[in-house]
Image: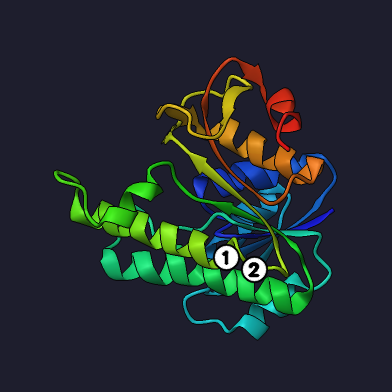
């Protein structure tokens, strides 16, 4: 498979890139900072410097042409303000969808977040306002991308991410209780979804008892 990952230098994306490369996939990683090229090459990816906050859909489509799937794993990051939540977590995700449509790539895997449905009611009492904007941006991206008939979109909403070692076991499904998940396990779930060619679903994932391969195979 040839897979294009947006936000390829992120913590989850690098783990995903390494997993896919080890499986023999060709992984193209979109990065904003040219200094990150060497890291991606070490991970087995092919880096492409392309800033999704300034690039056009045609620019991204040129890279996505011929891909078997695209993955949006980019994020403005915890230190960013509300403006970049909108330009990255929403705007760049939609840009990648536009590009995938133009390139004729149907499978689109979007990494979102548990809790985004809270954003439909504004800012919940006691929630950090910047985090609320993050959830709003993620939800807007989901709402704009999922209905597109030219795409086969899968949205994965992980719980709170940790740096602990992966266990290879998760709870994956709908309406599950909020929890944590190691980034290692989230990356493994994403890789398995891509290889199992699971599409057109919105699922949540946290640590749990089910082996990842079995959990993904049980999806519709």
Name, please, the residue furthest toward the left: 126
Distance in Å between CA atoms under marks 2 and 1: 6 Å
Which image quarter holds the C terminus?
top right
Residue farthest to the top, as pictured:
209
Residue at figure coordinates x 19%, y 46% from the top left = 127
Residue at 70% across, 68% down? 149
Is residue 68 in view? yes
Q: Nearer the viewer, residue 161 or 154?
A: 154
Name the quadrant containing residue 66: bottom right
Horizontally, is 70 left or right of 66 in the view? Answer: left
Where residue 22 sits in the image (x, y, percent)? 79, 40
> How far across and down, in percent of the image, does residue 218 sit?
73, 29
**Position above or below: 59 against 67:** below
The correct choice, above or below, for 51 with respect to 186 in the image is below
Which is nearer the eye, 104 or 163? 104
* Residue 116 location (% of width, % of height): 39, 49
Tell me if residue 32 can be seen: no
Q: How is the image coloured?
A: rainbow
Q: Is residue 217 left or right of residue 97?
A: right
> In the rendered image, which residue does mark 1 sit on?
145
| Image height of 72 relative to 201, above or below | below
Q: Residues within 10 Å of mark 1 (few under 14, many from 20)?
A: many
* Element type at mark 2: loop
Q: Residue at x 44, y 66 (%)?
A: 90
| Image x and y of residue 157, in percent | 50, 43
Which quadrant of the figure has residue 38?
Answer: bottom right
Kind of element beneath mark 1: helix
Q: Are marks 2 and 1 in contact (CB under 8 Å)?
A: yes
Q: Which mark is residue 115?
A: none
Foreground residue among 50 and 41: 50
Residue carrying label 2: 148
């Amino acid at each position: 498979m040839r897979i294009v990952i947006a936000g390829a230098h992120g913590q989850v994306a690098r783990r995903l890139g390494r997993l896919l490369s080890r499986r023999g996939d060709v992984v193209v990683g979109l990065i904003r900072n040219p200094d990150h090229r060497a890291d991606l090459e070490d991970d087995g990816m092919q880096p492409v410097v392309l800033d999704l906050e300034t690039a056009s859909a045609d620019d991204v489509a040129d890279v996505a042409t011929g891909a078997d799937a695209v993955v949006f794993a980019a994020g403005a990051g915890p230190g960013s303000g509300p403006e970049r939540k909108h330009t990255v977590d929403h705007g760049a995700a939609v840009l990648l969808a536009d590009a995938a449509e133009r390139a004729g790539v149907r499978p689109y895997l979007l990494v979102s977040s548990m809790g985004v449905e809270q954003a439909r009611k504004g800012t919940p009492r006691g929630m950090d306002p910047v985090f609320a904007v993050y959830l709003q941006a993620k939800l807007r991206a989901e709402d704009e991308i999922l209905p597109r008939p030219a795409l086969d979109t899968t949205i994965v909403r992980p719980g709170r991410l940790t740096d602990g070692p992966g266990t290879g076991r998760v709870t994956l499904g709908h309406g599950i209780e909020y929890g944590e998940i190691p980034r290692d396990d989230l990356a493994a779930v994403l890789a398995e979804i891509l290889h199992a060619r699971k599409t057109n679903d919105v699922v949540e994932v946290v640590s749990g008892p089910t082996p990842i391969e079995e959990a993904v195979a049980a999806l519709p």
